[in-house]
Image (cartoon, rainbow, N blue to C red):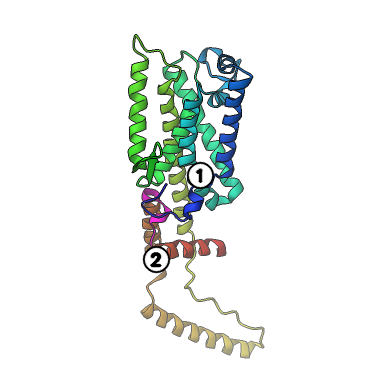
C-alpha cells in the first residue's frame, strides 16, 4: 500500500502488523481452525453467533459473533481488509498517546464497531444469526478513509484505487446485496445490512473525537497568558529614604520600557487573538486533511502552542 500524501512512517512499517491488529487476526484464525477441525460451523454459530431472539440470555454473543465466519473465504476477506486499513490507524493513535494506549484504543474502537452491527441488527433486522467481523472491519475502513481518503490501496492485491473509492464501492455493495437477500428468494448467511451499523458507529466516533479534541485545544488557547508581558520588578528591603528613591527609579525605568514596547510590539490582546486565529486554521486543516497535510511552518505553530501549554 502506498500513500498519495506520503505517510510519516516508512514503507516497511506500513506493512508491519501492529499489536492490536495482530491479536485480532490471531484470535479469528484460531476460531476458524477449531471450526475446520473440532467444532462445526453450526455449533459455533449457535453458541457464539448473535441472535436477537436470544438476548439477553446469550449476552456474550454481542461480541463473539465477530469471531465466527461462514467459511475460509469470508474470513480471509475480512482479515485482508483489517490488514490493509488497521495497522496505520492503530499506529497513528499510538503516536498520539503511546503504543499501549494506541492498541487499547484500537481494540475498544473495533468492539464499538462490532456493537454497531448488533444495534443495527436489533433495530432493523431481528431475524437469523449474525456472524462475521465485517461490521467491525468496515468500521476500521471508515475511520481510515475519514483520515486518509486519497491513499492508494490495492483491491484484491492487484487493482489500485483510492481508499475512498474502495469504501464507497463496498458500502454500495453491502446495501445492494442486503436488499437482494431480503427478497422472496433471498437466502444468505451474512446479514449485510448489519455491516452498515459498524460504518455508522465508526463515523460518529471519529467525528466526535476530532471535534472534542479541537474544541479542548481552542478553549485552552484562550486561557494562555501572553509571555511577552514584562515581569514586575520587586524592590529590595532598603531603609525608608533609599527604598523610596529605588522605587521611583524602578517605576521610571518600567515606564520607559513599556513606552518602547508599545511602539515596537502589537498590543498583547491583539497578539493573543491573532495566535488563536492562526491555531484555529491549523486545527481545521488537521480535522479535514489529517496531520500529514501540515507544512513545516504549521507544525512549528503546533509545537509552540504545545510548549506554552506545558509551561502555563
Q: Residue at x 40, y 59 (%)?
A: 279
Q: Mark 1 vs mark 2: which is more N-terminal?
A: 1
Q: Nearer the viewer, residue 109 or 235?
A: 109
Q: Nearer the viewer, residue 171 or 38?
A: 38
Give percent across and percent down for residue 205.
Answer: 46, 38
Cβ atoms at labels 1 and 2 below 8 Å apart: no
Which dot marks residue 49?
none
Q: Is residue 72 left or right of residue 149?
A: right
Q: Is residue 224 in the magenta section?
A: no
Mark 1, other Cα within 10 Å: few <14 / some 14–19 / many ≥20? many
Give percent across and percent down for residue 186.
Answer: 37, 13
Residue 221 in sight = yes
Q: Which residue is mark 2?
A: 297
Q: Is residue 63 left or right of residue 196?
A: right
Give percent across and percent down for residue 283.
Answer: 40, 54
Mark 2, other Cα within 10 Å: few <14 / some 14–19 / many ≥20? few
Quarter occupied by residue 191: top left
Look at the image and give the residue range highlighted in magenta.
287-295
Indicate the secondary structure of the residue bearing disc 2: helix
- Label 1 to label 2: alpha-carbon separation: 28 Å
Total numbered labels placed on residues in the image: 2
Q: Residue at x 34, y 27 (%)?
A: 173
When the figure is inspected, residue 124 is found, relative to residue 268, above or below; the finding is: above
Indicate the secondary structure of the residue bearing disc 1: helix
Q: Which residue is mark 1?
A: 87
Which secondary structure is most common in the magenta stretch?
A: helix
In front: mark 1 or mark 2? Answer: 1
Q: Nearer the viewer, residue 119 or 138?
A: 138
For the view shown, which residue lies furthest in the top direction?
A: 184
Q: Is residue 193 left or right of residue 16?
A: left
Q: Is residue 288 in the magenta section?
A: yes
Amino acid at each position: 500500500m502506498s500513500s498519495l500524501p506520503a505517510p510519516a512512517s516508512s514503507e516497511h512499517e506500513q506493512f508491519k502488523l501492529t499489536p492490536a491488529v495482530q491479536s485480532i487476526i490471531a484470535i479469528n484464525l484460531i476460531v476458524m481452525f477449531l471450526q475446520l477441525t473440532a467444532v462445526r460451523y453450526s455449533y459455533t454459530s449457535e453458541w457464539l453467533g448473535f441472535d436477537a431472539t436470544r438476548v439477553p440470555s446469550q449476552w456474550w454473543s454481542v461480541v463473539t459473533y465477530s469471531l465466527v465466519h461462514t467459511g475460509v473465504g469470508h474470513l480471509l476477506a475480512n482479515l485482508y481488509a483489517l490488514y490493509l486499513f488497521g495497522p496505520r490507524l492503530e499506529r497513528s493513535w499510538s503516536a498520539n498517546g503511546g503504543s499501549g494506549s494506541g492498541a487499547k484504543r484500537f481494540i475498544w474502537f473495533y468492539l464499538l464497531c462490532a456493537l454497531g452491527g448488533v444495534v443495527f441488527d436489533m433495530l432493523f433486522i431481528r431475524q437469523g444469526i449474525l456472524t462475521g467481523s465485517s461490521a467491525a472491519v468496515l468500521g476500521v475502513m471508515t475511520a481510515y478513509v475519514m483520515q486518509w481518503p486519497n491513499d492508494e490501496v490495492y483491491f484484491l492485491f492487484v487493482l489500485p484505487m483510492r481508499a475512498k473509492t474502495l469504501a464507497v464501492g463496498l458500502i454500495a455493495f453491502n446495501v445492494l446485496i442486503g436488499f437482494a437477500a431480503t427478497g422472496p428468494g433471498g437466502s444468505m448467511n451474512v446479514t449485510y445490512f448489519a455491516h452498515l451499523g459498524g460504518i455508522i458507529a465508526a463515523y460518529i466516533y471519529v467525528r466526535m473525537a476530532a471535534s472534542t479534541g479541537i474544541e479542548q485545544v481552542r478553549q485552552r488557547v484562550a486561557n494562555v497568558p501572553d509571555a511577552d508581558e514584562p515581569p514586575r520588578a520587586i524592590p529590595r528591603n532598603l531603609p525608608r529614604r533609599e527604598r523610596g528613591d529605588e522605587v521611583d527609579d524602578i517605576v521610571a525605568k518600567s515606564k520607559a520600557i513599556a513606552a518602547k514596547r508599545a511602539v515596537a510590539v502589537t498590543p498583547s490582546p491583539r497578539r493573543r487573538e491573532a495566535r488563536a486565529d492562526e491555531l484555529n486554521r491549523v486545527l481545521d486543516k488537521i480535522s479535514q486533511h489529517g496531520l500529514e497535510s501540515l507544512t513545516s511552518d504549521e507544525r512549528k505553530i503546533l509545537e509552540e502552542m504545545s510548549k506554552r501549554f506545558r509551561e502555563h
